[in-house]
Amino acid sequence: MKLYSTNNKDLRVSFKEAVFNSMPQDKGLYMPVDIPQIDADFIENIHQYSLPEIAYRIASTLLKDEIPAQDLKTLVEDAINFEAPAVKLDDNTFVLELFHGPSLAFKDFGARFMSRVMAYFLKDGEQLLDVLVATSGDTGGAVALGFLGVPNTRVTILYPEGKVSPIQELQLTTNGKNIRAIEIKGTFDDCQALVKQAFADEELNAKFRLTSANSINISRLIPQTFYYFNTYAQLKKQGFKEVVFSVPSGNFGNIGAGLLACKLGLPVKQFIAATNVNDTVPRFLETGVYETRPSTQTFSNAMDVGAPSNWIRIMDLFAGDVQNLKKLVTSYRFTDDETLAGIEEIDSKYDYVACPHTAIAYLAIEKFRAENPQDKSAAVFLSTAHACKFPDIFPENIAAKIEIPEQVKALETLPKYADKLGADFKGFKSYLMDKA
Ligand SMILES: *Cc1c(COP(=O)(O)O)cnc(C)c1O
């Protein structure tokens, strides 16, 4: 597998280089030079395969000989060791539960695969890999639990004081081992600025092998294609031929992976990019003007993104052809009031508790069906996180129905530990230098 930069199509790097660089120096994003087709026979018989089998087939088709077959198989089975069921709500409505991994969010797919790919490439004797990550909640937990105990790696997570939910905080601060958490007196933007400055700092780079684990890493994108294929397999088993996916979107990595799956040969009738009021993409598809804005805080805070970092990948997949893109991608935005109403509607209609991000995907698929009453495809909305991660959003009667998973209850018995720092770079830098 060779990759280019969206800013320089003549550039060629290996998968390994792309994984460790995360981003090309020209600030584009890595994209595969070739997007091979998944064997049509395989798609025809896909309902006979399990998620790890499907995952291996896609990974090996894309990566080619970057990782030898047996190693890749072991790696995929270790990374994707949880289910992604498409739960049937009525005749043709499904919720795709992507929250059965260790951090209870879909980011586990990306983080677990990435951490194992990095560990695989870090041969014995290579310098310890230092992963720096800023989180507003979900990313940190997925990355921490993805790298926990992975040899030759160390993760430093920065999170804003008082701005992550109790369960998210437990996932960040109870790990120990090769994971350290830093509570920053500041906002998520401060955390992100500190990490960015660290990457640009010569002294830190001379001393440490720094890498970022953010959502633009190509090794996070690839494993997110797996569950689109696996969903198609589940629906095919039930006799469906056409599927519409509604994806709650922030940085557009999730839906980007869905579109990549499509280019790899997955038949998808329509994608719906569902956003909260951070609506850069719906506005773009409506007006043709791509205008980023500072983000606004909402109930679906993992989607509070004003400048979606993966959007250029999507434009690249369509070679900049917006008309073509609009045939496959519809986009809708929803307010917090609508989100709450959506949560209540899913509860009363299906007796199902959806997290706020999931509720937005649900609202979008309902809007799509209202606008396209002739469409009888299987309608799948993606559930990107377990409701228990966002306890403050729900009205009491619905909150009471949320079941706390066993793995979270276990965290509650562990000691929490986080170092505390201000938002100034000097303090963060000397922390990193001194604690080496
Ligand atoms: C990260 C996240 C999203 C947004 O996914 P993108 O790939 O950034 O579009 C949606 N929901 C939840 C719960 C998330 O953690």
Image: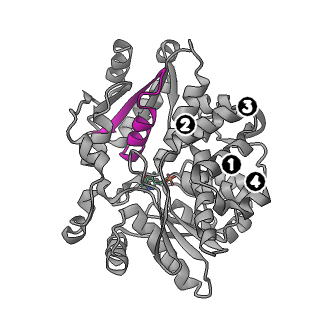
Q: Position of residue 316 (x, y in %)?
A: 71, 51
Q: Earlier in the sequence, mark 2 or mark 1?
A: 1
Distance of label 4 from label 2 (alpha carbons):
22 Å
Q: Earlier in the sequence, mark 1 or mark 4?
A: 4
Q: Secondary structure at mark 3?
A: strand
**What residue is pinned by disc 1?**
58
**What residue is pinned by disc 4?**
38
- Foreground of the two, 125 or 304: 125
Looking at the rendered image, the quarter that the C terminus falls into is top left
Looking at the rendered image, the quarter that the N terminus falls into is top right
**What residue is pinned by disc 3?**
13
Q: 10 Å neighbourhood of mark 3: few (<14), some, or many (≥20)?
A: many
Q: Tell me the kind of residue under disc 4.
A: Ile
Tell me the magenta residue range.
Answer: 136-160
At 34% from the left and 16% from the top, the residue drawn is 430
Q: Tell me the kind of residue under disc 3.
A: Val
Do the residues under discs 1 and 3 have CB atoms within 8 angstroms? no
Q: Is residue 171 left or right of residue 55?
A: left
Do the residues under discs 1 and 4 have CB atoms within 8 angstroms? yes
Distance of label 2 from label 3 (alpha carbons):
17 Å
In the image, residue 155 lies in the stretch drawn in magenta: yes
Q: Is residue 304 visible in this depiction of the protein?
A: no
Q: Position of residue 260 (x, y in %)?
A: 67, 54
Q: Tell me the kind of residue under disc 2.
A: Met
At 59% from the left and 84% from the top, the residue drawn is 372
Closer to us: mark 2 or mark 1?
1
Closer to us: mark 1 or mark 3?
1
